[in-house]
Amino acid sequence: MKGGKVHQTACHSRSLVMTNDPVSNSLPVKCCFEPQERCLQNPLENLELTCGYLLEEDVKCLSQYPSLGYLKHLNLSYVPLSRISLEALGALLEKVAATLETLILEGCQIHYSQLSDILPSLSRCSQLTTFYFGRNFMSMDALKDLLGHTSGLSKLSLETYPAPDESLNSLVHVDWEIFTPLRAELMRTLREVRQPRRIFIGPAPCPSCGSSPSEELDFHLCC
């Protein structure tokens, strides 16, 4: 795990939270996880590794811990994943597919070319109720593919997705004239496979109305 020394760690009987400072030094994988060996020996329901830098070896290491087989909540928000293979994350999702309820991959800078590594296992997370995937780099085709793979996730009650790359201008801001019909097309794609409950597609918070996924919104449809 890169990102300097562990800034904050909380270890409870079924929960492990590790937040890293933004220093750009690197630590060997075992330096980050060995101090938490006691937590990782027991079945965990909640794992949060946020605002740090995961190496590919880190993710592989996590996917091999038997204690994570009962995980209910996985939060990797704002951990940059754009430069590593996501096969190990796919393996971890496969391991917890029967129990995972919350998956937060918000702001992980995931590129659409990496999506195929996690889609098969994501589609089998049948207990998933919350899926945060905003602030990643997705093309329109990739988002359609992603939504199609959620067809069996009937328990999803809150989900967030980024605006497609095709709707971004040269400043990487949403062009609402382009984005609005694309979002409508994504909603049609989703409704062909299941009926969403609360869904938020686009930048958060919305620059137009200020709404965010945490609010009680049925759909994010402002222009």
Image (spheres, rainbow, N blue to C red):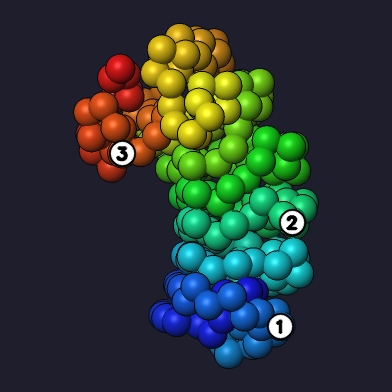
The amino acid sitting under disc 1 is Pro
The kind of secondary structure element at disc 2 is loop
Viewer-side residue, 62 vs 43: 62
Q: Residue at x 22, y 28 (%)?
A: 209
| Residue labelled with disc 1 | 28
Mark identifier at residue 152: none
What residue appears at the point 35 percent right and 38 percent down from the top-left corner? 204
Q: Amino acid at mark 2?
A: Ile
Left or right relative to 48: residue 143: right
- In space, the residues marked 3 and 1 are separated at their CA atoms by 36 Å
Whether residue 79 is visible here, answered yes or no, is yes
Earlier-in-chain disc, 3 versus 2? 2
Disc 1 on helix, strand or loop?
Answer: loop
The residue where tag 3 is placed is: 205
Instruction: Find residue 82 and report its horizontal and vertical position in percent.
Output: 67, 51
Label 3 residue SS: loop
Which residue sits at x=24%, y=34%? 211
Q: Position of residue 99 (x, y in %)?
A: 55, 52
Q: 19 or 207: which is nearer to us?
A: 207
Seen in the picture, residue 27 relative to 151 is either above or below; the reply is: below
Does residue 126 sit above or below 2 in this rendering? above
In terms of sequence position, does the residue under pointer 3 or pointer 1 come before the other?
1
Q: Quadrant of residue 219?
A: top left
Nearer to me, 4 or 186: 4
* Cβ atoms under marks 2 and 1 closer than 8 Å: no
